[in-house]
Amino acid sequence: MTGFEQFFVELADTHPKWNFVYFYQDVERSRIITGIYYTIGLSILTVFFSVVVGLVGAWMQGSKNKIARMTVQGFIQFFRNTPPFVQLLFFYFALGQFTPTHSPDGWLEVPIISNFGWAVISLSLFAGSYNVEIFRSGIEAVPVATREAAESLGYNRFQSFTKIILPLCFRICLPSLNNNLINLVKTTTQAFGIAVPELLYQCISVYNDYSTSMNAVMLLMFIVFFLIVGLIAWSSNALEKKLKIPGYGV
């Protein structure tokens, strides 16, 4: 046992309510590392797919097809008007019953979409419904004259959207998008409800083994999320400054 580990062993003896067991117990340390790994992975995937959903939805909202526009509106209303935790349970326990399974060992039937996969799908669609409206507002903020100029140059709708409107829209939307993505990262803790082994799930497991570690695991979880969210906020602010167009207002 190293001096670092010995310090926390002695701290647990003298201050039982501050038992940092994950610093000197290999099993508990492994749980915390796994939890951080899953939390970061879940955050990255949900942020990416929610942005994709938002872009596709905003594109469809500008379609001339009424069915496409109504489909997007129905999607937005469903995911914005129901709690994300209820959506998570619905996807995993309800829709999960109808997904195909496979048998890697010839005996056990395993769903092709795991609990982690359902968490990514559910949370991405939830945040994506807000991103649709964020991107829509950004698209509408692009001056009409800019769109007309793109059309006069021979751009079709897709080319105009990807090469002219989207770059400007992204700059306008970035502050609001940043807020939504930060909230999404914090919402990933709800994945513990379907046994995704992210940080909250692992912290509860550590606490169940060592009841004196509650303060220590909650402090760790607070610090980890503070760092992750802080990194996202810093990156977004740096990107916003880098993409700023002098004289354009964004």
Image (cartoon, helix red, strand yellow):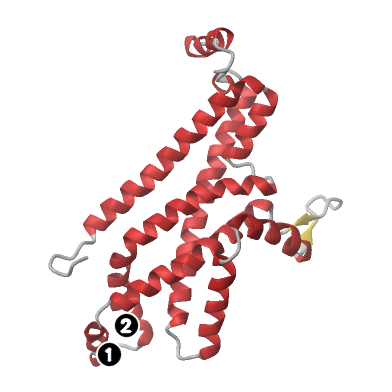
Find the residue positioned furthest to the front. 81
Name the one closer to the observer, 67 or 161. 67
Spatial separation of the CA atoms under disc 1 and disc 2: 7 Å
Locate the C terminus and report the quarter of the image it occupies. Answer: bottom left
Q: Mark 2 points at which residue?
A: 160
Is any part of residue 152 visible from this angle? yes
Mark seen at residue 151: 1
Within 10 angstroms of label 2, few (less than 14), some, or many (20 or more) residues?
A: some
In the image, residue 222 above or below residue 153: above
Q: Is mark 1 on a helix, strand or loop?
A: helix
Amino acid on which the number 2 mark rests in the picture: Ser
Name the one closer to the observer, 245 or 108. 245
Residue drawn 59% across and 70% down?
78
Find the residue positioned furthest to the left. 247
Q: Along the horizontal axis of the image, is 133 left or right of 208?
A: left
Q: Position of residue 214 (x, y in %)?
A: 59, 26
Q: Along the horizontal axis of the image, is 19 left or right of 137?
A: right
